[in-house]
Amino acid sequence: MILWNGKVLPNDKQNEVIDGLKEEIIHTLSFTSSPTINEVIEACGTLYDRFLAHSYDEIALPLLNALNLSPAALEHYSYPFSRDGLKKKVETELGALSKGPLKLDKNNERERYPLGVLFHIAAGNVDLLPAFSVIEGLLAGNINLLKLPTGDNGLSVKLLSELIKIGPNLAPYIYVFDVPSIETETIKKLSSLADATIVWGGEEAEKAARDFVDVHSHLIVWGHKISFAYVDSSVSDAGLKELSKSICLTNGLFCSSAQGIYFDTDDKDELEAFGKRFIEIFASTSKMEGAAPLTMRAKNSLSIYNDKLEGKPGIILTKDEVSTRILPGDKLELSYLFRDVWIKALPRQNIIKALKENRKLLQTAAVEVNPLHYKEVSDYFSKAGITRIVKLGDSSRMIAGESHDGEYPLMRYSRIVERYLLK
């Protein structure tokens, strides 16, 4: 399905409507006013209220089941669509520039304007992400072209078409296309119409984007990130339980999910003792939270079994369908997901040395250490490139107004125009 000026159309209409897109964009920019921030917030707030009132259960419930999420978890992750969440985001990211022109000096003023047209290439690891990326573009006043990720379940088109029903003035500012990634000429055509191409994905997605993004279109990349926990011998059982709950909740699928645990030590025996301590808490917590879906557990089991067959270095601990791998070295890497975590030694004085080369991949560090060492550890992580330092269990928490990977999208989707004042 595609979404064109408020209408849901079949995919066989895609080439036809894309051929007319440039003219449509010029008409919108020439003869309509960008939706105001308040219009966007009010429409999103109404959509959020209906979502919580179960108006969209026909698409929400299959999503919950597929990701093994509770209704409470979905409510948590949809909070950025709420009025309060969006208002705080605008206040934090745009500040006084959200209110209108500001004096530069007595003869000149400055005003924030949208970039114009954004082309969003969404990733498929979070189902609400494509729609939220478009909403960020709307808040900045842009026309938004969205390429759906492969395997999209229809949630994005449903939410955005409902948003347009609530706020009809948004229709010419939202276009959604179901273009396969192999159709590079179509993607190039869409990019050529955009003032900025926004890519959600890892290094491969970024490399591919650089080949097709038009020379006149900015490239804005929100890359896949890797997050982890960092603890020392003072870490509490309560903290490790909260960390385990967070891992079970997300199954390692989010950029903020802790993939592993770094332990502040250079002693192998101490590291192994911690691993044995953690697996007991992890397994107990997983049992309380409910088992991961069978397909997820099967993938995890196959990866662990393969490691054993190949005799890979490290100690593998399994219990009640969770796994912990105590590994040599301090290389940052993904876990096997689905309730598997790695554990590695990383003395705090080596944090920058170990992590700095991965600065583009770093996002969240969930930390519990001796309070005497917390400032030192958090400074090391900040210098290495980490953008979020949180308590154990808070890796995937959301706070209205927090940055996205250390940057503010609404400012990146805007430009400042300065002009002289008529006397």
Image (spheres, rainbow, N blue to C red):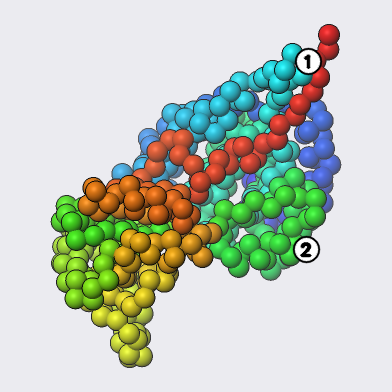
Element at badge 1? loop
Residue drawn at x 28%, y 63% is 264
Residue drawn at x 38%, y 64% is 350
**Rendered position, 381 above or below 312:** above
Residue type at the position of mark 1: Asn
Residue drawn at x 45%, y 33% is 85
> From this viewpoint, is residue 238 visible?
yes
Residue type at the position of mark 2: Glu
Describe residue 135's horizontal placement relative to residue 207 as left or right.
Answer: left
Residue extending farthest top: 423
- Residue position marked by numbered label 1 in the rendering: 107
The residues tagged by marks 2 and 1 sit, at their Cα atoms, a distance apart of 47 Å
User: Which quadrant would the C terminus be assigned to in this image?
Assistant: top right
Of labels 2 and 1, earlier in sequence is 1
Mark 1 Cα within 10 Å, few/some/many (few <14, many 20+)? Answer: few
- Residue 382, percent from left and from top: 44, 51
Label number found at residue 185: 2
